[in-house]
């Protein structure tokens, strides 16, 4: 100490007991780093995966008042979608069938388990409709129009999944805005001929157009056919298809 | 404190020491009262260390009451919906945006003082920069609140940021409203960094002086282990210079972007290229007015007249006068452009401003922003704390009305006369404006109570003792010429070695 020049500032050594910060504050830095990195990762995972429609909405399978099986009716028996959902080609809303539609067959058809259609019979006798539970429910600020899609060659299965394999109907796709936009931005990847809209087993490469190319990949066939159909059906350009007011009026 | 600096007399009719005049070869002192470094530390640290005063309690209680009112009206607004506000088509913006622009503008003096005046070596900034920077941050907090609630559904406000989401939707990058989000958030970040980094040495001073364990721990943590070593100082000064350079463009950019919100639209009264510079000048004008409004009572109450001297107040008054003239010139240009454009809509709008149902607001604005600052030409008015405070208050009122005039008068006469609508605020609008002052003053009172209100370390650098060959005032270095980071203040090195008490 004696050698220290008198103008030098006091070094820390000169004041061994000087308080700088509490010892536990040393833990703050790793704590903050762990919280910032870990918390950031955690929040990203929770929000990005946990709150995504893929996690929250896909697989929604409410219990219906009648254990009606699409697998049996649309799949094994091969009833066309439009036999029951009659309005899809003309209206925005895809109507649920009235009990009359069921009774067209079920007045004569015997069922393996008659208990299953007990509610249908009750409804038929009382005149009170069956209270089906809506599965594919979009927010009220989205104006989805079934006729616009069906008439431009968007297949039922494209949005509703393989309904012909569902004993009980569930939501197969996200129905989120980004999911809608994947098609609104590139409709050619999804379009099919109008007469194939309700076909649950349709694939592009089976189209007669590719009869001479048996080995063509599905995606290549879809793109080629889709581009042709897009022109043929006068599908609007992507700018219109992505405009806010196309879906939110 | 020792006797007043002998070179100066008093200003006529007041107790204020006149350090507003420079004589050749002799710079006016920026710190009065023949202070030693130790006196400076004592005077400023005392503000944060002294027992809570009743005056502070009253001020804090009033601010807290206004803040509570803000909380109540916010709850009412969010739970009911923004229909409780007076704005509706065609006046869709109204108070939410008026208050936003008003508060963002207030903040500009802080950045100007901390960044531009620093780069231009305006030493007088040291006494007021801490103060003005704090004001900036609290003003930006108030400013941020209004767009947040103006979106109507604050819980969706994250849509303003480009975050990947399930809607695969991005903000509209071509909209100035989005540029605002970036401009204001950058501004808030840089202002907080500037304020906090600049405060580190002073926080260390408060830590070294703190009596309580809690005070020691908190000041200790926030001073980030500052010891005052020369290595710390070298890095600190480098950092401060870089931050100042980074913040300088913000002074001009933030309010320019706010001006784009209006100028980019195609509305008569808004669609004009003069808006960005006119807004920046108005913001600096209003910002300095707010610094004066706060500094004049605070320096008296906190006993800081020797630091925030009449010279500081006068300098701010001069900046107010200069920017006030720019604002007045911009008003004149707007009217001239309207006339010269021969555009029917533009002309009728400006006639409507002067004569229509909002003429009272326009004339209030013109009086407060154009006429009132002219009094600052008179030295007796700008060197009298009372009259200066009054002019500054007028400027604050005028700047609020300027935004009212721009927004409400331009919107309320739509192109379709059938949509014309006279806008009046509801009680919720008015309570929220008053409540935002509650938020501002609550933060400000807490700042006055717990933090170093003047940059202790920086003020010492502009005192004569800091200059070996005599600096301001030509004074020779005193015997007590040493840094505060001496273990026991006020002792010479020899005394320190001998372990003597003063």
Image (cartoon, rainbow, N blue to C red):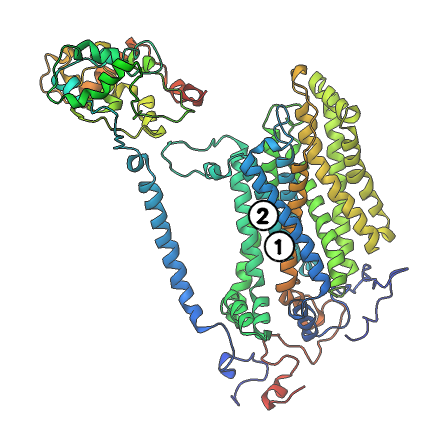
- Image marks 1 and 2: residues in contact by CB distance under 8 Å: yes
Q: What element carries label 2?
A: helix
Tell which subunit mark 1 falls on: B
Sequence-earlier tag: 1 or 2: 2
Q: Mark 2 points at which residue?
A: B141
Q: Mark 1 points at which residue?
A: B443
- Determine the residue positioned at 59% across, 81% down: A7
Residue B137 x %, y % = 60, 51
Q: How crowded is mark 1: few (under 14 residues within 10 Å), some or many (20 or more)?
A: many
Residue B44 x %, y % = 68, 68
* Residue B119 in sight from this viewpoint: no
Query: Looking at the picture, does residue B424 appear above or below residue A230?
Result: below
Quarter occupied by residue A96: top left
Q: Is residue A219 left or right of residue B193?
A: left
Q: Which of A54 and A96 is in front in this view?
A: A96
Q: Is mark 1 on a helix, strand or loop?
A: helix
Q: How crowded is mark 2: few (under 14 residues within 10 Å), some or many (20 or more)?
A: many
Q: Residue B348 carries which label?
A: none
Tell which subunit mark 2 falls on: B
Q: Nearer the viewer, residue A36 or B71?
A: B71
- Determine the residue positioned at 81% across, 59% down: B20
- Determine the residue positioned at 62% across, 36% down: B96
Residue B477 x %, y % = 71, 76
Q: Which of A84 and B231 is in front in this view?
A: A84
Viewport quadrant of the C terminus of chain B: bottom right
Viewport quadrant of the N terminus of chain B: bottom right
Residue B11 x %, y % = 87, 61
Quarter occupied by residue A104: top left
Q: How far apart are marks 1 and 2 (CA)?
A: 10 Å
Q: Which of A195 and B477 is in front in this view?
A: A195
Query: Looking at the picture, does residue B3 appear above or below residue B394?
Result: below
């Amino acid at each position: 100490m004696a050698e220290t020049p008198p103008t030098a500032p006091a070094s820390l050594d000169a004041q061994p007991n000087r308080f700088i910060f509490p010892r536990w504050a040393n833990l703050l830095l790793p704590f903050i780093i762990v919280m910032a990195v870990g918390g950031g990762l955690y929040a990203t995972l929770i929000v990005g995966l946990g709150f995504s429609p893929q996690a929250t909405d896909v697989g929604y399978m409410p219990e219906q008042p009648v254990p009606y099986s699409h697998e049996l009716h649309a799949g094994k028996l091969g009833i066309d979608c439009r036999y029951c959902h009659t309005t899809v080609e003309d209206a925005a809303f895809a109507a649920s069938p009235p009990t009359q539609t069921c009774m067209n067959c079920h007045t004569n058809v015997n069922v393996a388990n008659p208990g299953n259609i007990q509610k249908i019979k009750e409804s038929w006798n009382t005149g009170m409709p069956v209270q089906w539970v809506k599965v594919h429910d979009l927010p009220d600020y989205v104006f989805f129009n079934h006729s616009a899609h069906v008439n431009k060659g968007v297949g039922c299965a494209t949005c509703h999944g393989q309904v012909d394999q569902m004993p009980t109907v569930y939501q197969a796709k996200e129905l989120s805005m980004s999911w809608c936009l994947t098609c609104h931005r590139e409709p050619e990847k999804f379009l099919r001929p109008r007469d194939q809209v309700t076909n649950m087993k349709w694939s592009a490469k089976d189209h007669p157009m590719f009869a001479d190319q048996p080995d063509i990949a599905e995606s290549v066939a879809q793109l080629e056919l889709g581009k042709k159909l897009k022109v043929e059906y006068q599908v609007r350009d992507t700018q219109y298809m992505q405009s806010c007011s196309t879906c939110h009026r | 404190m020792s006797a007043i600096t002998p070179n100066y007399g008093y200003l006529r009719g007041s107790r204020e020491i006149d350090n507003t005049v420079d004589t050749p070869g002799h710079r006016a002192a920026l710190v009065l009262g023949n202070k030693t470094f130790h006196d400076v530390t004592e005077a400023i640290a005392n503000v944060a260390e002294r027992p809570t005063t009743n005056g502070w309690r009253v001020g804090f209680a009033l601010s807290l009451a206004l803040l509570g009112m803000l909380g109540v009206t916010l709850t009412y607004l969010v739970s009911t919906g923004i229909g409780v506000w007076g704005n509706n088509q065609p006046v869709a913006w109204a108070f939410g945006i008026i208050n936003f622009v008003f508060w963002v503008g207030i903040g500009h003096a802080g950045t100007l003082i901390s960044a531009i005046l620093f780069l231009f070596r305006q030493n007088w900034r040291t006494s007021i920069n801490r103060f003005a920077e704090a004001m900036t941050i609290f003003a930006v907090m108030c400013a941020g609140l209004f767009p947040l609630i103006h979106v109507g559904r604050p819980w969706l406000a994250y849509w303003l940021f480009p975050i990947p989401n399930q809607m695969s939707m991005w903000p509209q990058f071509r909209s100035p409203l989005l540029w605002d989000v970036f401009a204001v958030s950058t501004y808030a970040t840089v202002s907080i960094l500037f304020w906090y980094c600049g405060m580190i040495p002073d926080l260390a001073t408060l830590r070294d002086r703190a009596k309580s364990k809690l005070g020691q721990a908190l000041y200790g943590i926030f001073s980030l282990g500052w010891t005052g070593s020369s290595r710390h100082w070298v890095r600190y000064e480098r950092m401060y210079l870089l931050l100042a350079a980074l913040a300088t463009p913000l002074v001009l950019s933030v309010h320019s972007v706010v001006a784009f919100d209006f100028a980019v639209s195609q509305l008569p009264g808004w669609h004009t290229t003069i808006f960005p510079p006119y807004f920046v000048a108005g913001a600096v004008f209003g910002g300095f007015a707010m610094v004066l409004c706060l500094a004049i009572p605070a320096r008296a109450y906190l006993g800081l007249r020797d630091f925030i001297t009449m010279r500081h107040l006068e300098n701010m008054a001069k900046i107010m006068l200069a920017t006030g003239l720019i604002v007045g010139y911009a008003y004149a240009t707007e009217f001239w452009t309207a006339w010269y454009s021969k555009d029917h809509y533009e002309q009728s709008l400006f006639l409507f401003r002067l004569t229509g149902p909002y003429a009272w607001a326009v004339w209030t604005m013109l009086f407060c922003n154009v006429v009132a600052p002219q009094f600052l030409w008179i030295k007796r008015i700008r060197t009298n704390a009372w009259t200066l405070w009054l002019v500054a208050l007028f400027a604050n009122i005028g700047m609020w009305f300027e935004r009212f005039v721009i927004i409400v008068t331009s919107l309320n006469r739509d192109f379709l006369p059938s949509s014309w609508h006279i806008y009046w605020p509801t009680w919720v609008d008015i309570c929220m404006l008053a409540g935002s002052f509650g938020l501002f003053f609550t933060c400000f009172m807490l700042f006055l109570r717990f933090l170093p209100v003047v940059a202790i370390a920086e003020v010492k650098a502009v005192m004569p003792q800091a200059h070996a060959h005599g600096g301001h005032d030509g004074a020779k270095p005193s015997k007590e010429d040493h840094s505060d980071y001496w273990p026991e203040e006020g002792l010479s090195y020899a005394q320190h070695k001998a372990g003597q008490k003063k």
